[in-house]
Image (spheres, rainbow, N blue to C red):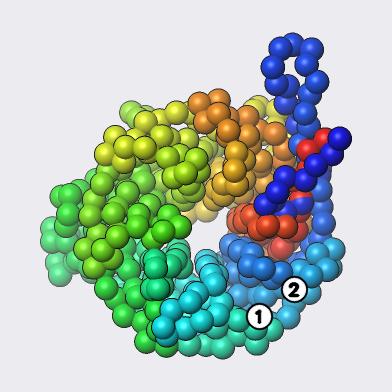
């Protein structure tokens, strides 16, 4: 008997991993990805991907030397075998837009589908911050507002609702350090906290966004941004990304070497610290992204570092998170994913075999894993997660030789789960539409 897991997009099955349950000799259950469709924009590197209704929103990233400002590409998935580019938005000269969030919103000031995308600048004079767009008609996006953030643009961003209000939650990397009144750019040090990395904007009227809250670990906890764990130039405490729970009452800040910081944001004007995850001696840190499961009692935390893996934690008591397990690829899977590919270091890190972003759907975790593709894991028992399937996009030539100048490669950056599909973005080959089947 074959079934498609509800809530999961079906993706191409290049690797299927059998998982036995129960006693030896019991029937094995096999999950596999099926490839449904693919679209290669054929231009600059792809960023994250998010799905909403029958459309996929594919963000973009700057190249090694170029910054073509391709913005966010919108694909119609009504025929998922042939994703069709129908529009673009967020094309601002001198910028790239690597993270986008899309939600249905109903407030006194707006009713429809709202998108927010992050803007980072390639040149000092370019715009940096985030943009809000009405994508109620995805074929004709309308710009509603551009919001500048200092001292740099929005790195990763989240759009959420709480009651009849809508909010943008954003990470401004290293703001608390770099905006300090006595920041020394030569030593990259300071002694006075600047403007916090984490900021909350009320976008209930998306034509007139306004900042209502902020939070920083240096000002609140006395933790200096430069006193991170691990080693190297990225040894730091900074907000890399943020998610919230569906009710908009808690925020989860991926605070790099500080772990995942959990805040009570039921009063967004005054975020309250509840607790954080912590690293063990010898860990590199680098808490990159997070996802929630098991009625918000489970946190999946990914680490972007050399050979980075995912940690599963019980956060029933946010003041004392409990580490349950690590999700790692087996040596055999690593060898298969590496075959014929050479990867350069990026920002001083070897990210070729690192996990990137997580998503959770029921008892399954979905992960983008750079060279190692899209990974599906059974996390129904979070103390003993099991990898059950993987999809490996075909390696392609790196147009600007940022990642693999001497060979073709793959670099799966983003993954998202919709009621119909699993969506994945490969930095080099674009959008992949998948389904996950069980037989």
Q: Relative to residue 142, is residue 127 drawn left or right? A: left
Locate residue 261, reporting x and y percent: 32, 48
Decide: is 121 above or below 341. below
Q: Position of residue 85 (x, y in %)?
A: 75, 77
State the quadrant of the N terminus.
top right
- The tag earlier along the polypeptide, 1 or 2, is 2
Is residue 278 shown to the viewer in this render?
A: no
Q: Nearer the viewer, residue 130 or 161?
A: 161
Which residue is pictured at 43% across the width and 55% down the height? 245
- State the image coordinates of residue 228 (x, y, percent, origin top left): 29, 44
Mark sitting on residue 362: none
The CA distance from mark 1 to mark 2 is 8 Å
Going 52% across and 53% down the picture, which residue do you hit?
Answer: 346
- Can you see residue 275? yes
The residue where tag 1 is placed is: 138
Return the residue nearer the eye: 184 or 140: 140
As drawn, the residue found furthest toward the top would be 24
State the SS at label 2: strand
Residue 224 percent location from the top left of the image: 20, 51
Q: Residues within 10 Å of mark 2 (few under 14, many from 20)?
A: some
In which quadrant is the C terminus drawn? top right
Q: Secondary structure at mark 1?
A: loop
Q: Which residue is mark 2?
A: 76
Which residue is drawn at the image coordinates 63% and 67% (left, top)? 52
- The foreground one among 153 and 296 is 296
Vertical placement of residue 302 versus 116, above or below:
above
> Could you say which quadrant of the image residue 384 lies in?
top right
């Amino acid at each position: 008997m074959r079934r498609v897991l509800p809530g999961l997009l079906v993706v191409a099955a290049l690797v299927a991993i059998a998982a036995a349950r129960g006693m030896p000799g019991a029937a094995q259950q096999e999950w596999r990805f099926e490839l449904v469709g693919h679209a290669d924009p054929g231009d600059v590197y792809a960023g994250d991907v998010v799905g909403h209704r029958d459309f996929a929103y594919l963000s973009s990233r700057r190249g090694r030397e170029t910054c073509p400002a391709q913005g966010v590409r919108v694909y119609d998935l009504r025929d998922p075998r042939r994703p069709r580019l129908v529009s673009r938005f967020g094309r601002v000269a001198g910028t790239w837009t690597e993270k986008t969030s899309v939600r249905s919103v109903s407030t006194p000031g707006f009713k429809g589908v709202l998108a927010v995308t992050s803007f980072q600048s390639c040149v000092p004079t370019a715009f940096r911050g985030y943009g809000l767009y009405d994508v109620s008609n995805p074929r004709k996006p309308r710009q509603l507002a551009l919001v500048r953030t200092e001292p740099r643009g929005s790195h990763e961003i989240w759009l959420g609702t709480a009651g009849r209000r809508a909010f943008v939650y954003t990470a401004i990397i290293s703001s608390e350090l770099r905006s300090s009144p006595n920041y020394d750019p030569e030593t990259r040090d300071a002694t006075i906290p600047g403007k916090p990395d984490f900021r909350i904007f009320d976008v209930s009227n998306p034509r007139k966004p306004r900042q209502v809250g902020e939070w920083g670990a240096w000002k609140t906890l006395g933790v200096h941004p430069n006193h991170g764990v691990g080693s190297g130039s990225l040894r730091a405490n900074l907000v890399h990304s943020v998610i919230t729970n569906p009710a908009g009452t808690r925020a989860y800040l991926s605070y790099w070497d500080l772990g995942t910081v959990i805040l009570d944001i039921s009063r967004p004007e005054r975020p309250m610290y509840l607790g954080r995850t912590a690293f063990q001696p010898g860990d590199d840190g680098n808490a990159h992204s997070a996802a929630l499961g098991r009625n918000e009692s489970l946190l999946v935390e990914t680490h972007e570092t050399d050979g980075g893996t995912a940690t599963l934690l019980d956060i029933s008591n946010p003041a004392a998170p409990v580490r349950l397990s690590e999700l790692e690829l087996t040596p055999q899977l690593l060898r298969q994913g590496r075959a014929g590919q050479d990867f350069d270091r990026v920002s001083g890190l070897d990210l070729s075999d690192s996990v990137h972003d997580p998503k959770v759907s029921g008892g399954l975790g979905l992960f983008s894993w750079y060279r190692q593709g899209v990974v599906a894991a059974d996390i129904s028992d979070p103390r003993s997660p099991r990898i059950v399937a993987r999809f490996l996009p075909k390696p392609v030539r790196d147009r600007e030789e940022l990642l693999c100048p001497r060979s073709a490669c793959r670099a799966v950056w983003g993954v998202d789960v919709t009621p119909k599909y699993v969506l994945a973005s490969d930095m080099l080959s674009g959008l992949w539409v998948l389904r996950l089947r069980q037989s």
